[in-house]
Amino acid sequence: MKRFIILFFVTFFAIDLIQAQDIIVPKDKTKSRLTVVLTKVSQEPQGIVEYKDYNNQEGPTYTMPWSQINMIITIDGATIYPPEEIAEVEETSVKKEKTFVFGVVAGMNMSNFKYKYSDGFVGSVLNYGYEKSLGETPNYQSEMGYNFGVTLDVKLVNNFFIKTGLVYTNHKVSNDFNGKYEIAEVFSDEGYVGYLIGYMYDRFEENYSLNYLDVPILASYRLPLTKNKKLNIQFNAGLNVGIGLSGKLDYSGYNTSDGYNLTFVDYYSGSIIDYYGRDTYIVGSMDLFSGDGSYDYSYITGSSGSENIDCANPYKRLNLGLNLGFDVEFVGINLGFSYVLGLNNYANSSFWTNSRAQITEYAGNGVKDYKQHTNSINITLGYKIR
């Protein structure tokens, strides 16, 4: 019995003695843990740890920089991490995330007009006077616009947010119109009476520029890509509300016979009297939200003049869209991609069903049941003040 009690106490104190030691775990996994007695532990990130060999406590004092240490396990079982890692953990766990995060953003976009119509005839804002059999089908092309503004992220719960802001957005779209039609009209010159026959061509460039104040209202989910949330990706979806501030159409072009290609034929004999040419050059602009506009014209003969355009406004100011996209954010710097699908028809029916903006002497057709919206691709770069 006495031997058992002695053996028990020897074993107990041996276990306690084994546990009464400090352990240094190196960052280099190829090296073994060190069983030591700590003598000094620096609290500076670039500091050192001083220790003695546990099995030779009367021997020399050794040192090891924190940069080589993964962690220290003390006698009482506590874990000590390098000072810089502690600071990072404390910053991540203690710092409370803001409910409201403001930011600034700027970028570019590529926009285009999408339209629908019925009755087989469609045209652009400008009326070139063509009949239904010839048509004035527009060929809208995307041009580079821009945007800039302020943003606001409102934290709801966990990683869910509401994203909104005020963004000034410029949409640019172009259209090249090339038309050809045949003429056969009564003509007289130098005592001769007959017909002027041949082909005329219209070649015009239209440049649309629409400026909106956009208010995005988006539901957003943030997916952290690092533990400290300094790198994350946000997925966004919602409504884009645009209020038209200004809209302008600039256009230029000419109506021409491409040289002296019109034939003057005698009314009685049918013989060719002479060849003629016609050229009319036109440059003008128009407010797309009011309908006000004017253009200057000049003829090949040298005479010129100007005309005002009196018509209804082609477009309404409200522009709604479905906004889908994502942002990649790193330490506040934000790179965003989004696609805005136009939802509402902002074409003013009273303008499109009538004569539109007439710039020739011929009154062309209106467009029946015309509807138009704008789609755009946006790329932005911003900064959030977290």
Image (tube, rainbow, N blue to C red):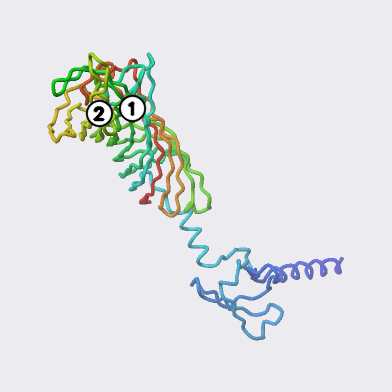
- The quadrant where residue 153 appears: top left
Please rate how many residues cluster around mark 2, counting C-alpha atoms within 10 Å: few if below 14, some from 14 to 19, many from 20.
some
Q: Position of residue 120 (x, y in %)?
A: 39, 16
Tell me, for residue 235, which label it has, or none: none
Q: Label 1: which residue?
A: 179
Q: Is residue 141 left or right of residue 58?
A: left
The residue under the point 17% across, 26% down is: 309
The residue under the point 49% across, 60% down is: 88
Of the residues shown, which amino acid type is indicated by label 1?
A: Gly
The residue under the point 47% across, 40% down is: 235
* Residue 212 visible in the shown view: no
Position of the N terminus, as image quadrant, is: bottom right
The residue under the point 39% across, 46% down is: 380
Relative height, residue 205 to residue 24 (above, below): above
Relative height, residue 268 to residue 263 (above, below): above
Q: Position of residue 98 (x, y in %)?
A: 38, 47
332 and 210: which is toward the camera: 210
Q: Position of residue 27 (x, y in %)?
A: 63, 68
Give how far apart the Cα atoms at labels 2 and 1 are.
22 Å
